[in-house]
Image: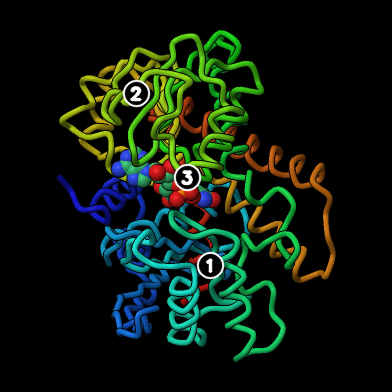
Amino acid sequence: MKSAFEAAQFYFEEAASVIGLSDSLRDLLVTPEREIKVQVPIKRDNGQIATFIGYRMQHNSARGPMKGGLRYHHEVNADEVLALASLMTWKTAVVDIPYGGAKGGISVNTKDLSTDELERLTRRFVDEIHDLFGPDKDIPAPDMGTNAQTMAWIMNQYEKFHGFAPACVTGKPVELYGAEGREEATGRGVGTLTLAFLRKFGRSIENSTVAIQGFGNVGSFTASYLHQAGGKVIAISDVSGGILNRDGIDIPAALEYVAVNKSLAGFPGGQPVSNETVLSIDVDVLIPAALGNVLTEQNAGDVRARYIIEAANGPTTPEADAIFRQREIPVLPDILANAGGVTVSYFEWVQNQQYFRWDISRVREELEKYMTRAFHRVWTIAAERHVSLRTAAYILAIGRVSRATELGGI
Ligand code: NAD
């Protein structure tokens, strides 16, 4: 199996070949601008010192300050963070917001740390990298294992060095310069494009079944959106395993259950199944919304979904992607499908720069506009060039980034 960065590069190269991108621009666009790796030591609650490794990979800034999430997960490593940083360059270009791409992470199992320890870890990481990010350089946001509270700590620590600067990070709590609608944004964007995607195939959500892997920020808001839109969500899962109910899962009840129990384990609204089963059940729409590399050469042949929507980043390996193309299972790619989060992060940053607050209806309206515009553009490119939606999304993104690079010069 290709490494995460090799996989990201594979998709880039495929699209670069279709548009005949020059070798010199290819070299420039695959080479990250800066790779940061720092030691992040903290004092544990028991007085002992624990040492972690933190990363911030800054891939490309041709179209603006770099933008990307911060992930706390025990599998975080340099290769994966770099792959995710490059995806951000293409994602911000696909939805046409004025940013480049970056990503960060700390290799840590958050369940092993107390809230106080997580706060010390976050502040120490900011101490190490505060000169290298900021409102006009690189703006972090939440990703797996981080949330609005983490962003509040980042802002507070950054401001100790640089003064008032709420635009240094997005995904903040609404009470602390965050944007209404940011928390739901990625799931809402996934939901919006799922409906648009189904319509292209002459189908509606009311007559479709859905399976979602991952019930965190993205998975749960996607489930709510599709449930409210009339879809039948028949399977959901989290790290503890999956739940299947062919009559449709009561999503509000599942959300309440997780709010209390912190996981889906024991949720009574369906039968327990494995995470692998969730990926292979007979369903109309499969939405991986957890980790990367879950759809592989080994299980792609077992997938019985008619459509795949990539809510997670990098859930499909290139080998699996080839199998889906051959099996004619359309895939809505991550750099388009889950771009709602970074789009509303952009709205938050704009509001912070202007000291102005939009109401939720304006956020939702603008989000829908950005997402559907990008979707129709990608759809048209795919139809015109007879390529997959993934290749079309990369073509759109690479075109925008390479034009900015040529116009700006080096
Ligand atoms: P999260 O931490 O809120 O939730 C992750 C979910 O995945 C949890 O339900 C967790 O239990 C589950 N999970 C973890 N390991 C699993 C496993 N081995 N099998 C099945 N489920 C597992 O994270 P999130 O913010 O929802 O991010 C999910 C994905 O979406 C990631 O790939 C992330 O990069 C991507 N993404 C997130 C955003 C955002 O705004 N949060 C934006 C774009 C893309």
Could you give the CA–CA distance between mark 3 and mark 2, rounded to whole angstroms?
A: 16 Å
Badge 1 vs badge 3, beta-carbon distance below 8 Å: no
Q: Looking at numbered disc 3 in the image, what kind of residue is underneath it? A: Lys
The residue beneath circle 3 is: 262
Q: Position of residue 236 (x, y in %)?
A: 43, 28
Q: Looking at numbered disc 2 in the image, what kind of residue is underneath it? A: Pro
Tag 2 secondary structure: strand
Residue that lies at the very extreme toward the bottom in this rendered image: 161
Please indicate whether residue 79 sits to the left or right of residue 350 in the image: left
Location of the N terminus by quadrant is top left
Badge 1 vs badge 2, beta-carbon distance below 8 Å: no
Q: Position of residue 161 (x, y in %)?
A: 60, 91
Crowd rating for badge 1 (residues with CA inside 10 Å; few <14, some 14–19, many 20+): many
Q: Nearer the viewer, residue 14 or 74?
A: 74
Nearest to the eye among marks 1 and 2: give it.
Answer: 2
Q: Measured along the vertical axis of the image, is residue 107 above or below residue 210?
A: below
Tell which circle, 1 or 2, labels the residue nearer the N-terminal end.
Answer: 1
Q: Residue at x 31, y 66 (%)?
A: 107
In which quadrant of the rendered view does residue 163 lie?
A: bottom right
Tell which circle, 1 or 3, labels the residue nearer the N-terminal end.
Answer: 1
Q: Residue at x 33, y 57 (%)?
A: 83
Q: Looking at numbered disc 1 in the image, what kind of residue is underneath it? A: Pro
Q: Measured along the vertical axis of the image, is residue 270 above or below residue 335?
A: above
The residue beneath circle 1 is: 140
Tell which circle, 3 or 2, labels the residue nearer the N-terminal end.
Answer: 3
Badge 3 vs badge 2, beta-carbon distance below 8 Å: no
* Whether residue 286 can be seen here: yes
Q: Is mark 2 within 8 Å of ligand 1?
A: no
Crowd rating for badge 3 (residues with CA inside 10 Å; few <14, some 14–19, many 20+): few
Q: Measured along the vertical axis of the image, is residue 350 above or below residue 158?
A: above
The residue beneath circle 2 is: 272
